[in-house]
Image: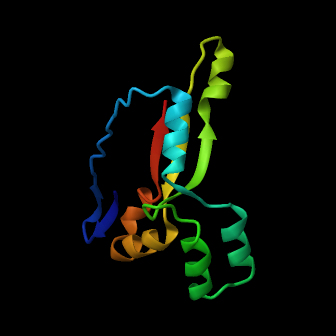
Amino acid sequence: MGNRTTSEGPVLQSSTVRHERVATGLSYDKLVHAFERELGHLDPSVPQHLVEWKASWSEVEREIGSAAGPHGLMIIARADQGSLISLSGRDQQCALYLVGNPLIARQIIDIDPRASFYVPFRGAVR
């Protein structure tokens, strides 16, 4: 997860990440719809404008908080990987999502900066 330095030099640390696969029985299109319905959507222009305006933290909390879905999470980014790799001749349906909440991420990263590797988390639908 990061490097630490002692008087003898750097000490490497490692961690294990576990990936889970969940079979839903849904078609790809229905799964994408169900997944996205459960999450809010963060318009990428919102954080950009907040930074440009040098918004107060209370303004950030209000704007970002309003993008959260029913579970407090939002889609921060979506990459349609399937469309491009399908050009190889084998149809692939796969979307990669960055999901999280920057307000919650701030709290987590305050506790341990190494958490910035994991928030927002990644989820793939295929």
Please tell me which residue is depicted at 62% across the width and 61% down the height of the picture. 42
Q: On the picture, is 103 further left or further right than 62?
A: left
**In the depicted structure, whether residue 114 falls above or below residue 99:** below
Percent coordinates x, y for residue 115 in the rendering: 38, 63
Does residue 94 appear anywhere in the picture?
no
Percent coordinates x, y for residue 46 in the rendering: 69, 69
Quadrant placement of the N terminus: bottom left
Does residue 46 appear anywhere in the picture?
yes
Percent coordinates x, y for residue 32 in the rendering: 54, 37
Please tell me which residue is depicted at 30% across the width and 64% down the height of the picture. 9
Image-quadrant location for residue 61: bottom right
Seen from the viewer's position, the closer of residues 61 and 107 is: 61
Q: On the picture, is 63 further left or further right than 97?
A: right
Please tell me which residue is depicted at 66% across the width and 27% down the height of the picture. 83
Please tell me which residue is depicted at 43% across the width and 71% down the height of the picture. 104
**In the depicted structure, whether residue 42 falls above or below residue 95:** below
Identify the coloring: rainbow
What is the residue that sits farthest to the top in this orientation? 89
Percent coordinates x, y for residue 59 in the rendering: 62, 84
Q: On the picture, is 7 further left or further right than 33?
A: left
